[in-house]
Image (cartoon, rainbow, N blue to C red):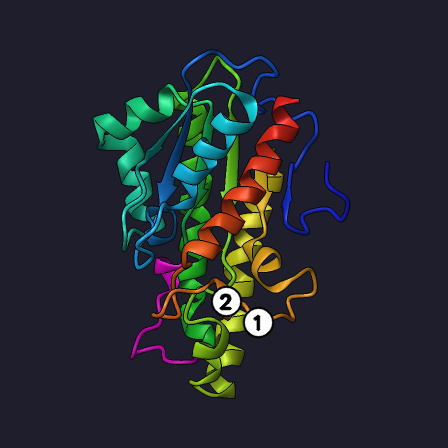
Amino acid sequence: MLSGCFSSATPASSSSPTSASSTPHEGWSVVALGDSVPRGTQCGCTPYPDLTASYLTASDRREVKATNDAVGGFTSADVLRQLRSDSDVVSDVANADVVEIEIGANDVAYSGSCGTSVACYQPMVSSTERNLDQIVARVHQLTAGRPIQLILLDYWSVWLGGRYADAEGPVYVGAVTSVTNQVNTVIKRTAVDTDSDYVDLRAIFKGPDYDSDETPYLASDGDHPNAAGHQKIAAAMVDLIRQRLH
């Protein structure tokens, strides 16, 4: 386990019953669920789920396959629906060794009706928590009877980040920080409560004290990771997965 619990990419429990086996079978599979971040939107690059598989294949000398079932614009309700009714996704998850889930930002997407009123987004945060609980439960149901590693990732910012957020003014920055805190708290709490692993992308992009500028890791829309951002996420994922494998 990394020092500084949950500082970046850390197992929620070193004895998790859902951790990957130390001797995974050949044809090992990583499946990604979530929104436009794992999908690789606005990057024009290889997104982190695919990079994770490539890095593991190169370092461990075994073929690791990535299946990217993330969809741009998806909310937590959409992922839950996928896991209940999309036969291809159900099959992918049922045969996965690692399941990566990053979802929640679109649940609290900036809206003209709420603007920078943090309280206005609270019902969406509560809904995200309920859905995420059910998403994790459904993954366990689909993979019952064999070990997997379930990893939940959060966000550096659920709206614009870095200099793009700064350009919107201090009220916007304060609101997005508060809403991001709420969403990330839900994701971290769900990981702890379900013995899942947790990746703190805010620490990875902004440093352990959340005080560095994440702009170098953002695409030109200010909202999604660029190639450097995806590489940074993938490196953290590989470190976390290899802790479970070895």
Q: Nearer the viewer, residue 221 or 231?
A: 231
The magenta region covers 105-117
Task: Assign the C terminus to one quadrant of the image.
Answer: top right
Any magenta on residue 114? yes
Q: Residue at x 51, y 52 (%)?
A: 154
- Picture coordinates of residue 109, whole percent (x, y): 35, 66
Dot 1: what SS? loop
Q: Amino acid at mark 2?
A: Pro
Q: Nearer the viewer, residue 70 or 105?
A: 70
Any magenta on residue 11? no
Q: Amino acid at mark 1?
A: Asp
Dot 2: what SS? helix
Q: Residue at x 73, y 41 (%)?
A: 2
Residue bearing mark 1: 213
Give the left or right position of residue 168, taking residue 68 as reference.
right
Q: Are marks 2 and 1 in contact (CB under 8 Å)?
A: yes
Task: Assign the N terminus to one quadrant of the image.
Answer: top right
Point out which mark residue 184 bears: none
Q: Nearer the viewer, residue 32 or 113?
A: 32
Q: Nearer the viewer, residue 156 or 76?
A: 156
Residue 183 visible to the viewer: yes
Give the left or right position of residue 15, taking residue 141 as reference.
right
Q: Residue at x 53, y 62 (%)?
A: 182
- Picture coordinates of residue 19, whole percent (x, y): 58, 24
Pair 2/1: label in front: 2
Q: Majority secondary structure of the magenta segment?
A: loop
Please count the marks in the image: 2
Q: Residue at x 49, y 82 (%)?
A: 166
In terms of image quadrants, where is residue 67? Answer: top left
Residue bearing mark 2: 216
